[in-house]
Amino acid sequence: MNDRIDTRLLSIPRLGFGTWRLSGAEGQASIESALSLGYRALDTAEMYGNEVEVGAGMKASGLPRGEIFLTSKVWWDHLGPGQIRAACEASLQRLGTDYLDLYLIHWPAPDMDLPRVMHDMLRLREDGLARAIGVANFPAGMLRHVVELGVPIAANQVEYHALLSQERLLKVTRPNGIVLTAYSPLGRGQLASDPRIQAIGARHGASAAQVALAWLLRQDGVAVIPKAARLETQRANLAALELAEKLTEADVAEIDALPKDQRYVNPEFSPDWAA
């Protein structure tokens, strides 16, 4: 299995490193350790309040900027005229870099002018502030609207794990060369202790968390960004890439058969997921 997903716009690492809630000196240390282990994709956002730490961790790693795939996001209340560019420039300043590999709309705003918002996002790519643009938390109907606008996007980042189906979204992302990036891939930790997945892991000498990640990693057009503060967990998550090639059809069928209606991230400003 290729450890990168090649799109028409750019190549995206299949397994990245989520940084939500990793802040301060400890957060920076976690980012540095992840890079030292071999992670080459970092996911942050202006809302996380840790772009300074992410940038410092990148600098401390000694890695060339071009070896790190860096994603950040604009918050949903910064989508007004002129606000997206200002937010992106502020993120770049905090991160200490002159470009992002991927810049996303973090959440759709209820009253946003989607054509104008996507035009403003596209200008960032045209002006070199981002190599590619994308969205996050867009339901299938809204994502289809973006595609119909003719705006080339690289990814839609959404909650996706073994207890939540994203088949409707995948039917839009795959034929259009859009990567579906899975956040909360362990269902806010629930899958790490799920006895059904633990049993599959026992057959492979792996943890339930590794099995849950492997189930996602083996899917076409799906990238995964687990967060892990501890070095041991970061190393274990990396091993899920190898496990993805070892899961049997029976293993996958067992996971596929689990209930797929458990959504853990659903703030009051969420879009209509069925739209």
Image (cartoon, rainbow, N blue to C red):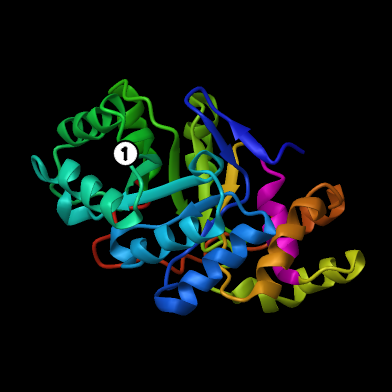
Q: Disc 1 designates what residue?
A: 142
Total number of numbered labels? 1
**In this picture, residue 200 sits left or right of residue 176:** right
- Of residues 253 and 92, the one nearer the viewer is 92
Q: Is residue 108 above or below residue 35?
A: above
Q: Residue at x 8, y 40 (%)?
A: 81
Along the viewing direction, whichever of 144 and 204 lies nearer the viewer: 204
Q: Which segment did they paint magenta? A: 208-219
Q: Is residue 91 left or right of residue 17?
A: left
Does 268 sit above or below residue 126?
Answer: below
Q: Main secondary structure of the magenta part?
A: helix
Measured from the top left, where is residue 254 in percent x and y? 78, 58
- The residue depicted at 66 percent of the width and 73 percent of the height is 231
- Indicate the position of residue 223 as horizontal and vertical percent values: 58, 46
Residue 220 visible in the picture? no
- The answer to whether residue 25 is seen in the rendering is yes
Q: Residue at x 15, y 46 (%)?
A: 86
- At label 1, which amino acid type do we have? Met
Q: Quadrant of the C terminus?
A: top left
